[in-house]
Amino acid sequence: MSSVTAQMSNNGGPWRLYVVLYGEPRWPEFRWEGTGPVPTVAERRAALAVLGYETTPGAGWSWCEDSRDPDDITTPVLLIAAVTVRPRGEVTS
């Protein structure tokens, strides 16, 4: 399997992390309980490990923001982070 993207998002509730697998009906997902601060890099790595993935060497998290209604600047912001991942233990050349 080649590398894929993991995303983490929050729209005011719990943070959730999921691995984007196109063509699959369900994506691996991890949710943190409650509405705490942004999960640390260590917490994100642990969550990815639970899902069977790891970040690819040299990959860093990128952040962007979105909203349910991009034409209304008063709507709550949806934060989205993304990183390239691979199945745990997979070696790429």
Image (spheres, rainbow, N blue to C red):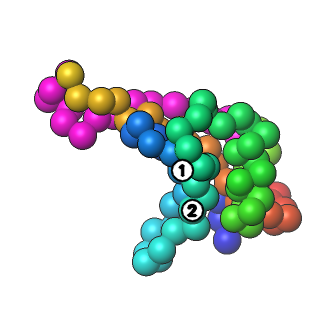
For the point 15% across and 26% down, the residue is 72
Image coordinates of residue 69 in percent, x first then y, are 19, 36
The picture quadrant where one finds residue 92 is: bottom right
**Three-letter code for the amino acid on which mark 1 is drawn:** Arg
Please state if 23 lies on the left or on the right of 55 as rendered: left
Instruction: Look at the numbered disc 1 and give the secondary structure of its residue.
Output: strand
Q: Pointer 2: residues within 10 angstroms few (<14), some, or many (20+)?
A: some
User: Which residue sits furthest top?
Assistant: 73
Q: Is residue 93 above or below residue 26?
A: above
Position of the N terminus, as image quadrant, is: bottom right
Image coordinates of residue 52 in percent, x first then y, are 74, 66
**Three-letter code for the amino acid on which mark 2 is drawn:** Glu
Q: Does residue 14 appear in this view? A: yes
Image coordinates of residue 3 in percent, x first then y, are 65, 59
List the residue tagged with mark 1. 16
Task: State the residue in front, 15 or 83.
Answer: 15
Q: Which residues are magenta?
A: 59-73
Q: Is residue 62 magenta?
A: yes
User: Which residue sits furthest front?
Assistant: 34
For the point 33% across and 34% down, the residue is 66
The picture quadrant where one finds residue 62 is: top right
Q: Marks 1 and 2: in contact by CB < 8 Å? A: yes
Task: State the residue in front, 40 or 6.
Answer: 40
* Mark 2 and mark 1: Cα distance apart in space: 7 Å
Please state if 17 lies on the left or on the right of 2 as rendered: left
Q: Is residue 88 above or below residue 62?
A: below
Q: Pointer 1: residues within 10 angstroms few (<14), some, or many (20+)?
A: some
List the residue tagged with mark 2. 29
Instruction: Look at the numbered disc 2 and give the secondary structure of its residue.
Output: strand
